Image (spheres, coloured by chain):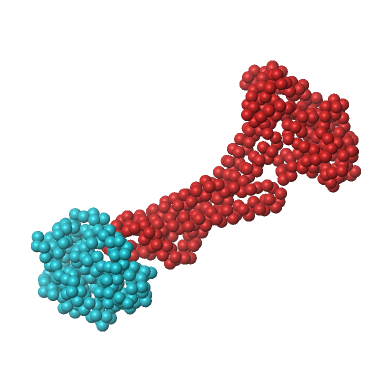
Amino acid sequence: MNFAQSFIEAIESLTANKMRSGLTMLGIIIGVAAVIAMLALGSGAQDSIIGEIEGIGTNLLFISTDNENVINPKPLTLADAEALDDPLQAPAVNAVAAAVQGAAEVSYSGESSVVTVIGVTPDYTQVQNMTVAEGEYLNDTHLTGQASVAILGANVAEELFGRANGIIGESVRISGQPFRVIGVLTAEGGSDFGSADDQVLVPLTTAQVRVHPQDTRGEVDTIYVSAISSEAVQDAITQVSNIMRERHHTEIGAEDFSIMSQQSMVDMMSTITGILTIFLGGVAGISLLVGGIGIMNIMLVSVVERTREIGLRKAMGAQRADILSQFLVESSLLSVIGGGIGILLGWAISALVGLIATASDFALNPVIGLDAVLMATLFSGAVGIFFGLYPANRAASLEPVEALRTD
Amino acid sequence: MNNTTVVEVKNLTKVYKMGEMEVHALRGLNVKIQRGEVVSIMGPSGSGKSTLMNMLGCLDRSTSGEYYLDGESVAEMDDDQLADIRNRKVGFIFQGFNLLPRSTAITNVELPMRYGNSNNGRSRREAAIEALQSVGLGDRLDHRPNELSGGQQQRVAIARALVNNPSIIMADEPTGNLDSKSGDELMELLLNLNKERGTTLIIVTHDPEIAEHTQRVIHIRDGVVEKES
């Protein structure tokens, strides 16, 4: 018996019971659609999170105090940051910035808002890839003079002034102290992952004394280092570690500081979102399993209903394998067609969710990978064969005499 | 073995186990049927007549004994070999027609050829048309069973039984579901086909009128041949 013939017959038999076939397929459709949508949204979320991390600045290293391994960690200081900016000992380092940060109230003529105020050294905008939309950057004079000047993030400016331009020279109060606005950062837009749009930058020295004096006591929270290129990140880590170990008198393995590269953050977030995606896909996969059980159920009913037909076919010379393949073709056809529709539906769902997310200002671009489509197709086919196997085997094992006797 | 002998059964027994009980349906039965014969098998219910039909049609295996169908020893065959020999050497006509309800007459007749490996698609169709024409249904090729009368449906079944040129045709109460007029026509058709093609015909029936049409009647009782007439 050739395959094309059993294919045609399977189609005939499925279309003879359209309602039943449709409902059985629905289980697979929902299962596959759920898997596809979950995987697409998961990898979309992964892409946008990683995109944001990468947008922070290329080649970036973060140095912070590590008090997990050490009992009395030495705090990071501005002097540490200055020592790292040494072209001889650290040739792979391009720029270094130190920062203290904390929440503070910023107000302007009655409007006030609690935002992240970061005290930074002038190179901060450079290592973080920030630009000012108008006004000027912080400079060394501001730093040494503990100047009361501030650069506002775009959202902060919008909130206080109702506009993001023409506010240079205005005076705002940060923690009750007057600061002159010297610049507004270019809006990054669309991001809520520690976005610079919601920050205010002031000189490090000013912040240490007047904004976050209780937190900092002359220390810095983070030192940002940018490597000269992405290939030089590893060299930069080594060089920075050497300098820091020497300054803090610590052994290898007992450092009181930790260095995170942007790559390690990307890796970490990839792992987290990857696990999340697999988890969601797995939950969706359960519904695919339930769909498979639906197929098995209906195939079993179908075998009982068609016992006499099976007996007839056997009397006409159908062998075990003929009957087996007839029912397997039917069940896998159900699941593969269902899988195909499910892929389309899953694509539609994830596109819809992506549109909604974009409309609500959260950049989410669902990605339907070829691997997800391939996996869904293979998996639904396998579900059809697996759950069809038992009913088909039952049909194939019927004794012709018994089967012909059934009404 | 004589090459005009198509069915040779020697000392055939069949025992069914029904729980603890053993039912001896056939108890050492012997039958010989010549090529081209028309034979009816008669017997009261419980005589072993249906069991014998299942054995002769290679639908079931005997408990012991020998069965040669067209020179091939059937008794030792496994399920797939039995399926193959049914396909090549046996045509079935059932009381309830047993057509595939959603398929056309021509597709129904093509069915046995699909499980064989001799014909390609085109010659299958031609053979099916030829078989349907021989039973007088050349104008009903694309009708489905529910568009045909009982007599016509049974004629489709006859065409299906003929199409692989089997050594024997087993008919189990072929007129049982038909009114007497269609039944008579059908018997006439079967006997004509036997005359024209020389097909060996074995009819299982309890209807003495049917048996009267056949050259030879084998009476079965208690699992053995009681008498022949």
**Residue A340 at what x, y percent from top left?**
50, 55
Q: Is residue A159 visible?
A: no
Residue A386 versus residue A242 in the image, above or below: below
> Would you identify the image quadrant in which residue A170 lies?
top right
Q: Which chain is cyan?
A: B
Residue B184 versus residue A192 in the image, above or below: below
Q: Is residue A216 visible?
A: yes
Task: List the single residue furthest toward the left.
Answer: B2
**Residue B7 at what x, y percent from top left?**
15, 64
Residue A251 versus residue A213 in the image, above or below: above
- Count the numbered circles shown: 0
Q: Residue at x 65, y 47 (%)?
A: A364
Q: Is residue A22 left or right of residue A108?
A: left
Q: Is residue B224 left or right of residue B118?
A: left
Task: List the single residue furthest toward the front.
Answer: B122
Task: Name the quarter where the N terminus of chain A is drawn.
Answer: bottom left
Q: Which chain is red?
A: A
Residue A407 versus residue A206 in the image, above or below: below
Q: Residue at x 21, y 58 (%)?
A: B61
> Would you identify the image quadrant in which residue A49 lies?
top right
> Would you identify the image quadrant in which residue A110 lies?
top right
**Residue A198 at what x, y percent from top left?**
77, 41
**Residue B201 at what x, y percent from top left?**
18, 70
Task: Name the quarter where the C terminus of chain A is drawn.
Answer: bottom left
Q: Residue at x 79, y 33 (%)?
A: A118
Q: Residue at x 67, y 37 (%)?
A: A54
Q: Is residue A264 left or right of residue A383?
A: right
